[in-house]
Structures are given as structure tokens and as C-alpha cells.
Image (spheres, rainbow, N blue to C red):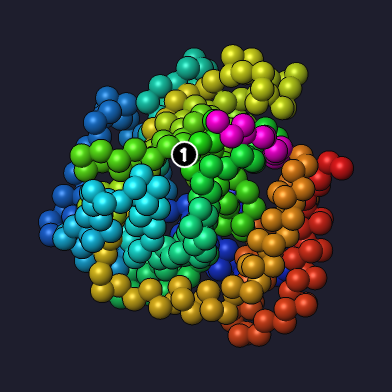
Amino acid sequence: MIKQTGCRLTRLFIPCTFLFALLSALSGPVVGSDAQNGDPDGDGASERQSYTFSWNLTDRPDQLPRGGLTKGAPVNLVLKPSSAWRSLADPSKSDFERDRAAILSMAGEDKASFEFLETIVFDPALDQSRPYQSWGTEYIFVLDDKKTFISLQHILVMRMRGEDGEDNPPITIKHWRQDWQYEDQSLNIYLGDNQWRHLAVDPASAEKTWSQSVFQVDDSPRYESLGRWVHSNGLSTWESGETWRPLPRREFSVRDDYDLLVGTNRHSITPTGWIQEEDNLKVKLSSSSKRGQFEGITTHSVLAREIGLNRYERIEGFDFSPATEYWDKTQGFWDSVKEHWRDVLTAKSSYSIKKLEGQSLLMSLMMRAESIAASNEHLIEVDRNFVTSTLDDFVKTDQ
């Protein structure tokens, strides 16, 4: 079922122009500049894209990729293999050191492209969903490094090109965060229906693994899974276990006929960047249970399978200074948000994120941060009180 979306009010007044810019950048466009979309020569080849699974799209105009219609400023790809990638083959490094080097190598200045395609539809009542394409220019930096713990923060700096060929002022948006923990014995597991719970991992199962915790744009938890890095003959890859996760924005903004994704991720380091592959099932939970994580997938309805390819390619000469300026002004605020969530997760209690009529946790926090960035004023106590009040309204913990 397709949903109509539009401008909505939250606790704070949200200018529709900013909201549309935010959603456009996060949801992504179909058409970018030639250089953004893999046609650096500008000869129009990007308009002649074909898919390996093009049988899904043949003679189906309604199956053209969906997304926004923005174009981006041209970028310059780095073609020389990075020193970080070369270091992964250093025979003097231990496996643990290679793991760390692989994770840290994901930090950098990137052109990001996101593509998702349904390959199988299991429900005969459904038509195939349109493929999804998106792009971004993304600044990824090391937020924290404590040897067995690494945190990477993503920030988008989007330069849209207007119809007149001129670049608009950059739009800077805090994006997702990924935290990596070595031999993690405590996982945050999604149960469906905006509910999560703690899952203990025995030491033997956690040995030599890294957990990856993925956090939303507003720093709320999304999903977490264990996996092992494998380094062999130029290959450095980490693969997650099967993980339940909430619908991403690209899906919940247009669909409401299923409840969650059940998927695996694979992160691979390349000579000039890194790639995240996804293999997802689109699942509708049975009416008898909204906590089906431990009942097995067979108790629920699988609507479709999709594959995803998120490619991060290193670029040079792109001005990412708006990202560092934004973070310099708002880091204290987002630290307060992370601190609140750290308390929730450390308590190891089940919790849920409530849906409040006419309000949005994402937009409440994002607009507060935008206000701080614009005013250049950060009152620690005032912002901490705002964070506590807002998250207490939206987050319900089981005592």
C-alpha cells in the first residue's frame, strides 16, 4: 500500500522548505549529476543504465527507479589505492589490528550511492516494488576510538545543482552512526512494533567477533549484530548475522504493508572506499505476536526479498567544511542525546519508542540541533533538559 506523505508539525515549528530539503537528502534522488551517477564524461551514459535483473523492468515504465529529482555538483573520484587499504595486507599486523584498520578505513570523504532492488515477490497480491536509487556526498569521521570500541559518525553535505546549472548553498545534515565493539556480550535486539530488548551473548560466541550497532539520524538505536572480519588475499570483509530491523526511511515513507526487515549486511573494504551489501526479507508480523524475534521467521509472512548495494567511493577536492562547522556547534547537544540512550541501553531493560500524534522524535531533535547550529548558542543545561524531556516523552522502558 502506498502512503501519501507531506509536511507535518512537531513540537517545534518546522519550515516546510527545510523539511523537504531534509527528506530529499535522506530519501535521495534518482537523477544526480553525470559525475555523481557514474558518468564522469558527461556523455549521457547514466541515462542508459541497465540492471543485471532487468527482466523485472522490461516494458514496465511503472518500474523505473524511484527517488527525488535533484542533481548534485560534480565530484572527483580518487583512483589511487589508499594507504589504509594497503595496510590490510601488512603481514606484521595481527587479525585484531587488521580488524581495527578495516573499520577505521571507512572514515573519509565519500561519494555515496544507494541502490535497492526487489528480486523476488512472494505475495501474489503484490506487484513488484519500484527499485530505489539515491546518492549523497558524505563526510565520515572517527567519533571515538578506544581500541576495542570504534564509533564512526556520518554527516551529509549536499550541494544541489539548480535548473540554471548553478549550485545552491550546501545543506548539511547529520546522518547515521555506526559503533563497533570487540567481543561484545550484550546486544540490542529489535523485536518489531518499535520494541527492543537486551540479549546476552556467551563469551565463546563473542570471541574474536565485532558487533556493529547502527543508529538512526536522531541517534536512536536501529539494529545490532555480531560478525567476524575475514582478511585473505586482498579481501577484508565483515558479515553480520541475521538481524531484525525497523523499516528504513526509503520504505516507511511510501509503504505500510509490512512491519520489518530481516536481513544481513556485508561490509567490504575496497582500494578506494568500501561497500555495504544487504540481503533483506520484507516481513509482515503475524497478528498473534508483535515480539516474533524468538518464534522464528516461519510464523510470519514474507512479502518479498530485496538486495541492496551501498557504495562509498573516496573523493577529493570537495568542500566538507560545513560538516565540521556543524559538528563543532552541535556536538554538545548530540552528546547529551547519546548519553541518554547510553543510560537506556546500559540498564538492559526492554524499551519501545512511542508514536505520538502530530509529533516526531526525529524532527524534534533535528530541528533543535539546527537551531543551535544557526544561533551558535549551546546552553548545556538547557539542551540537556530538552533532551531528557523529549526522550522521556517518546521512550518507554520496562522496569
Please determine whether, in this image, residue 282 is positioned above or below residue 110.
above
Residue at the location (82% across, 55% down)?
Answer: 393
**Label 1: how many residues lie within 10 Å, few (<14), some (14-19) or many (20+)?**
some
Residue lying at the far right in this picture: please name it: 399
Of the pair 268 and 55, the residue shown nearer to us: 268
Query: Is 385 displayed left or right of 100 in the figure?
Result: right
Of the pair 92 and 114, the residue shown nearer to us: 92
In magenta, the rendered stretch is 194-204
Q: Is residue 153 visible?
A: no
Residue 376 is one of the magenta-drawn residues = no
Query: Is 281 displayed left or right of 342 in the figure?
Result: left
Please determine whether, in this image, residue 62 is positioned above or below residue 97.
above
Q: Secondary structure at mark 1?
A: loop
Q: Is residue 100 visible?
A: yes
Residue at the location (65% across, 57% down)?
Answer: 362
Question: As shown in the figure, which amino acid type bears the numbered disc 1?
Answer: Lys
Query: Is 100 displayed left or right of 314 in the figure?
Result: right
x then y, percent, for residue 179 = 53, 52
Residue 294 found in image quarter: top right
Residue at the disc numbered 1:
208
Residue lying at the far bottom in this picture: please name it: 376
Of the pair 91 and 265, the residue shown nearer to us: 91
